[in-house]
Amino acid sequence: MRENRKIRQKSTKDSKSGGTDPRYLEIANNLRQELLKGKFRTGQRFYSIRKLIQVTGRSLPTVRSAVNILVVEGYLQPRPGSGFYVTNKVEEISSRGRLNILTVMPSYTTPTEPWFTGKIFTGMINVAERNRAVVSFYQRRTSFRPDPKDIKIDIERILSIRPSGIAWLHAKDFDVPLLKELIAHDIPVVATMRKLKELDLPLIQENNLVFASMVLSQFQARGHRCLVVILRDPHDEYFESKVSALTRTAQSFGIKLDENDFYRMKAESGASQQIKKRGESKWAVYKKDAFELERFLKQRKKVTGIINLASEGIYPILSLMESPFKDYFKRTSVLHNILDGVAIPPLPTGDSLATIAPPLEILGEQLVNYLCAVVQGKTPELQQSMIPVFSAGTSMKMAPLD
């Protein structure tokens, strides 16, 4: 009963704080701590789903998602019709000191989504045991318009987890106040993909020149000579670095690509969150962008290829594919950059979407390796030039003959 009360108290405390964190992550972190403190023996049956619903006051999907995290991490083994049982990994870890590597994510992604964060998570788990580390997760409240109250809650919650080191996913400039506070507590932090103007954080990212060369060579091989690029915020360091690399290398591939060929989306950053909050359709939120993009493309009649750098940029494209403008895409190639955990959608044309992405599992491994080395006083290897992964879909076509 005392343990049950403990789980309930943690959940209630979080509710009173007004948190918007997905509760399954909080429940998973609490249950992981119970396991690592030796409450359960190897082979012992774990709490039932029904019991966890009762003591946490959370729904069935929330509780199942929490337990699924522990299954993926290897602490629990599901037995159909019987429940979940504790594996020997718990005993091995609890008998030795372990580093707690905390993965801090934004509100719009989860450790189990299959396109971006989920693959990073897989890589982190792959090397955690080798480094005698435990990987846990926190979904930050701080958003595109950060509130000082949210920053305070994030700091309190992150510090309460007592991380040995922090892997900060999808860093943005509005994260700087929170990161400064954490660094002041002497917690090692490593970020991914994007440099922050006010902080010189260790950074693990893909090689932008290799990214640009890989993208342009795919279009060149199919006979494309005029391209456009869709991006979200030209002042975002991630997009600035990609734009710079693409424009610097385009001429060497015989491709026309300059500042006039970049379409900057009009929808404000974070429109995906608007869709969820207001229940609006993607098409309603991005209607203006679809209209503007159509006009932009009509002004560039020689263009036969589109590079979509912004994940949300796929929505205006999909909208146009289902409009009277759809015939345009019979002769136009589309390449989608996987970013921020946005699902890869099917195309109305029946084509499969060609994609390019960082080597995400390797990125996850590097995060854990780097932080563990720092904490252990070793010289860390910071890999900043990972090779992106290209997947050819049928949306990449041969350019039409003039």
Image (cartoon, rainbow, N blue to C red):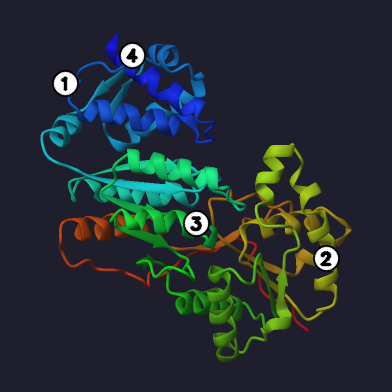
Tag 2: amino acid = Glu
Q: From the image, which quarter does the N terminus lie in?
A: top left
- Please tell me how crowded label 1 is: few (under 14), some (14-19), or many (20+) other residues with Cα within 10 Å: some
**Rendered image: mark on residue 41:** 1
- Earlier in the chain: of badge 4 and badge 3, it is 4
Q: Is residue 362 visible?
A: no
Q: Quadrant of residue 200?
A: bottom left
How would you rate the neighbour count of disc 3 (Cα within 10 Å): few for under 14, some for 14-19, many for 20 or more?
A: some
Label 3: state its secondary structure.
helix
Q: In the image shown, does 112 or 304 lie closer to the viewer?
A: 112
Q: Are marks 4 and 2 in contact (CB under 8 Å)?
A: no
Dot 3 amino acid type: Asp
For the residues marked 1 and 2, what is the alpha-carbon distance in whole angstroms? Answer: 61 Å
Whole-number angstrom distance, CA of label 1 to CA of label 3? 40 Å
Residue of label 2: 292
Secondary structure of residue under mark 1 = loop
Query: Which circle marks residue 4 in the picture?
Result: 4
Of mark 1 and mark 2, the one earlier in the sequence is 1
**Residue under label 3:** 175
Q: How far apart are the two marked residues, 3 and 2, measured between alpha carbons?
A: 31 Å
- Indicate left or right for 344 with 133 as reference: right
Q: Does 48 sit above or below residue 352?
A: above
Real-space CA distance between mark 4 and mark 2, rounded to the nearest whole angstrom: 56 Å
Which residue does the image show at 53% across and 80% down from the upper left?
245
Residue located farthest toward the top when viewing the structure as drawn: 1
Residue 282 image point, x, y percent:
74, 47
Residue at image coords 78%, 57%: 321
Say above or below: 212 vs 35.
Answer: below
The residue lying toward the viewer, choosing from 80 and 174, is 174
